Amino acid sequence: DTGVSQDPRHKITKRGQNVTFRCDPISEHNRLYWYRQTLGQGPEFLTYFQNEAQLEKSRLLSDRFSAERPKGSFSTLEIQRTEQGDSAMYLCASSPKDPQVLFFGEGSRLTVL
Amino acid sequence: AQRVTQPEKLLSVFKGAPVELKCNYSYSGSPELFWYVQYSRQRLQLLLRHISRESIKGFTADLNKGETSFHLKKPFAQEEDSAMYYCALIPSGTYKYIFGTGTRLKVLA
């Protein structure tokens, strides 16, 4: 197992376009998280799943953002009608039941022009 | 509101000097606290968690509930300790990590 993988690693898009990021967690991990990180800031919580259930969603996540984890394995994060303020690094992490330790992917960097 | 504060954006020390990276939190309950580290060109990874009371790579952190702090310490800094360090907490009853803004540690030769 190579750890948490994210795709694409970099995405440049024009304002108003939709983008989708994919995350493949460590296979035996039941929890999956999405975080966003901008320059000079720590990771900001967006949402997390336990198996296929989305258990919590941040108020930061406007209705343009949606995340899914359809079979409790990989997850997608879609951003519709992108805005320049969406430019950030989107981090995915997975965690086993115990201990509650996050294993991060390398991130997907989004640039909205 | 639950919050993690890391007051220093950058901390520079000489090799062999002691290091203390500050972390304060605001949370009324009993959180679980962590330090995560990101070395250059690597992904964010766990350094240590308060519940395990371990020393990892010479680093230790003690939870001080009275001062609501979880400072990271190392008696003798090494150049390979240069990295970005994030303090994080999980409020009890949730699985949601809250991160601080991070401190960049530079260890000078």
Image: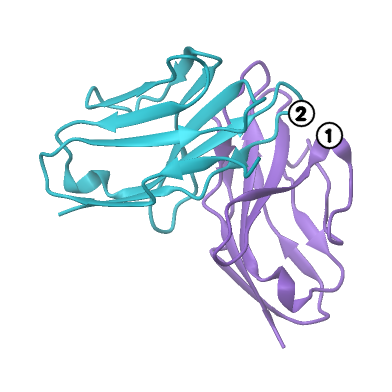
The residue identified by callout 1 is: B51
Q: Which color was chain B given?
A: purple
To which chain does the residue with label 1 belong? B
Residue, x 66% and y 40% (percent of image)?
A1
Q: Amino acid at mark 2?
A: Pro
To which chain does the residue with label 2 belong? A
Along the horizontal axis of the image, is A23 left or right of B33?
left
The secondary structure type at the circle numbered 1 is: helix
Is disc 2 in the same subunit as disc 1? no
Q: Residue furthest front?
A: A1
Along the horizontal axis of the image, is B23 left or right of B72?
left
Q: Could you say where residue B38 lies in the image, as x and y percent from the top left?
A: 61, 58
User: Which mark, residue A99?
Assistant: 2
Residue, x 51% and y 19% (percent of image)?
A49
Q: Could you say where residue A43 lies in the image, as x and y percent from the top left?
A: 49, 44
> Circles 2 and 1: CB distance less than 8 Å?
yes
Q: Quadrant of the C terminus of chain B?
A: bottom right
Looking at the image, what colour scheme do you see?
Answer: by chain
Q: Could you say where residue B28 lies in the image, as x and y percent from the top left?
A: 66, 25
Q: Amino acid at mark 1?
A: Ile
B17 or A4, which is in the foreground?
A4
Q: CA distance from mark 2 to mark 1?
A: 10 Å
A66 or B85, which is in the foreground?
A66
Q: Residue furthest bottom?
A: B109
User: Which mark, residue A96?
Assistant: none
Along the horizontal axis of the image, is B53 left or right of A67?
right
User: Looking at the image, can residue B1 be seen?
Assistant: no
Of tags 2 and 1, the one toward the viewer is: 2
Res. A44 image quadrant: top left
